[in-house]
Amino acid sequence: MTIAEKKQRLVARLADLRDARERLAYVVECGRQQPPLEGELKVDSARVEGCLAQLWLVASFENGKCHFRTDSESAVMKGVAALLCDFYSDQSPVEIVETDPTFLKQSGITQHLTPNRRNGLARIWETIREFAAARLKENGGTTG
């Protein structure tokens, strides 16, 4: 599925949710569906700085696509991170770098997050973007 298709599907799903409580419950459920990271992956180098809660993001690159996994001690932050990891996983570095998550604001997700959680979302996006940008640089601006 392309990133544009993922975006369309996610925006449609979020549009079905009527209020802040439903949207927050959806985010938390996204986190619950993610298996926890193995203990050996919860290292300082995988920790997303700038989040109040412990949050880890593990990135990998295979066959020209980026893949992301996450875990957190906070159900909401794990959900936010899982939503972004799922959205950006299995996409090329170019697609990731060119598609920021500002559509989440238009979909009503970010307005209901506390300022600290919005900061965490920004740091998660920054971590994902930096990983993708580094893969682009390694490959001379191409995905393969």
Image (spheres, rainbow, N blue to C red):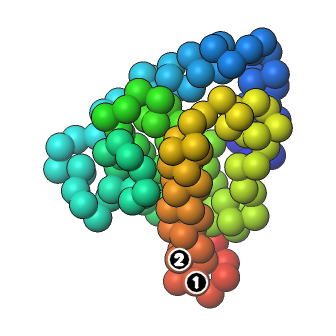
In the picture of the structure, the residue carrying the numbered disc 2 is 134
Along the line of sight, which residue is nearer the eye, 78 or 51? Answer: 51
Circle 1 crowding by C-alpha within 10 Å: few under 14, some 14–19, many from 20: few
Question: At which x and y percent is residue 93?
Answer: 63, 66
Above-or-below relation of 51 to 97:
above
87 vs 101, nearest the viewer: 101
Residue 143 horizontal side relative to residue 130, left or right: right
Q: Is residue 43 left or right of residue 64?
A: left
Q: Image height check: is 2 above or below 137? A: above
Q: Quadrant of residue 26?
A: top right
Residue at the spot x=56%, y=26% of the render? 27
- Horizontal and vertical percent for residue 75? 41, 27
Q: Which residue is mark 1?
A: 137
In the image, residue 122 above or below residue 16: below
Q: Are marks 1 and 2 in contact (CB under 8 Å)?
A: yes
Q: Which amino acid, by three-letter code, is at mark 1? A: Lys
Q: Quadrant of residue 59?
A: bottom left
Residue 66 visible from this viewpoint: no
Quadrant including the C terminus: bottom right
Count the marks: 2
Q: Vertical placement of 74 versus 91: above or below?
A: above
Q: Amino acid at mark 2?
A: Ala
Q: Residue furthest left?
A: 40
Mark 1 element type: helix
Mark 2 lies on a secondary structure that is: helix
**Left or right: 76 in relation to 38:** right
Q: Position of residue 67 (x, y in %)?
A: 49, 52
Among all residues in the image, which is located at the extreme front? 115
Q: Position of residue 73 (x, y in %)?
A: 31, 34
Residue at point 35% right, 49% down?
A: 56
